[in-house]
Amino acid sequence: MSMERFVYADNAATTPVSEEVLKAMLPYFREGYGNPSSIYQKGRDAAKAIRLARDKVARGIGAQPEELYFTSGGSEADNWAIKGVVEALAKKGKKHIITTAFEHHAVLHVCQSLRKHGIETTYLEVGPLGVVKAEDVAAAIREDTALVTIMYANNEIGTIQPIAEIGKICREKGILFHTDAVQALGNLEIDVKAQNIDLLSLSGHKIHAQKGVGALYIRKGVRIPNLIEGGGQEGGHRAGTENVPAIVGLGVAVEIATKDIQARADKTRKMRDRLIDEITKLPRTRLNGDREHRLPGNVNVSFEGIEGESLLLMLDLRGVAASSGSACTSGSLDPSHVLLSIGLVHEVAHGSLRLSITHETTEEDIDHILKVLPPVVEQLRAMSPLWENIVKGENR
Ligand SMILES: *Cc1c(COP(=O)(O)O)cnc(C)c1O
């Protein structure tokens, strides 16, 4: 089978480093190799590059530069935020976390691991549309609640959570609010002050910076324990010589991603809607997650009578790179916890496909997906005993 075209439709898993980002990073590998802690010119130049990057990232989310801490990515930021707040507040008897059932594993597994330290977690339901209700957050708050951690937008089904409403409730009740904004950054407006966010995680590689770099915003006045002890980097809170090229790249990536959000989102949304409209015309095919409160580039559909992994392999052969859940869960046979959280039964969850596009996706890319996907679905169903039973059930 010749591969005439390659369409990358898995931008929620990772994105390529953009030309602008790469260009900004390159000088810091060779000429600009100084240690930012050194006092001679080469060191000061590197320190200045980090300062500029911190300014850019801060500006992108409405924070002050000194409220930003560079990390190795979104997972590290999530871990630090949650463990940090809990460690700081458990001493004061606050041993309760509120989150949702469909967070990223970097949040869920942290909450699970804290159980053995006597920390209790409430996992709020997100309902069939995958949107948590702010009033459910309010109702779950207890005397001993230390932290509310709820993602801004879901990485699998793309649903957008009422972050500002939740932030307001938490601020009024004096409870710290963390949000994993890895998928929201560059797609939705973020203003940590207006939205009353106390801690926020972001990652570089979902917005065209490199893998292995991210940041945690910690509002001034919020004190959590240091993540790594050592030198004075990141205000002494996260020691270790800085990854200068990666941080420079992150700064540029955030600057680009947070400019013209509306225009890019409008363009992406149009292509996304075309995909959704066409794909859901197939029989026994459903869209997962709310259609309106949804990331501009996210399509997540389930095809009854199909096995998601086979679908991905067939699409790969036809030049389409997509995902069946989150990249971390594919390869395992457990259905996605996100799809189960919105009430899908196992068989249907197994037949799911996530396409994640950007404004750089083209109409021709969409044409290609819409050309190859329906025949693949039909072919797989023709071979599927599951599908045979479904059709028989219909005729009975
Ligand atoms: C990708 C992702 C992460 C993890 O970020 P890394 O930089 O890969 O560690 C966390 N949360 C969400 C919602 C993500 O999509």
Image (cartoon, rainbow, N blue to C red):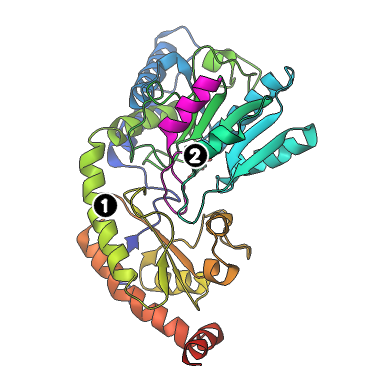
Q: Is mark 2 within 8 Å of ligand 1?
A: yes
Towards the viewer: 370 or 254: 370
| Quadrant the N terminus occupies | bottom left
Amino acid under label 2? Met
**Residue at image coords 40%, 83%:** 378
Q: Which residue is mark 2?
A: 151
The Cα–Cα distance between marks 1 and 2, rounded to whole angstroms, is 21 Å
Element on which disc 1 rests: helix
Towards the viewer: 326 or 396: 396
**Residue at image coords 21%, 61%:** 363
Q: Is residue 28 left or right of residue 175?
A: left
Circle 2 residues within 10 Å: few <14, some 14–19, many ≥20: many
Q: Earlier in the sequence, mark 1 or mark 2?
A: 2
Considering every residue shown, the one lying at the far top of the view is: 39
Q: Magenta segment, which residues?
A: 151-173
- From the top left corner, tell me how far across and down residue 157 is, in percent: 44, 54
Element on which disc 2 rests: loop
The answer to whether residue 257 is magenta is: no
- From the top left corner, tell me how far across and down residue 39 is, in percent: 47, 7
- From the top left corner, tell me how far across and down residue 42 is, in percent: 41, 14
Amino acid under label 1? Arg
Residue 269 — which label? 1
Whether 328 is drawn above or below 391: the answer is: above
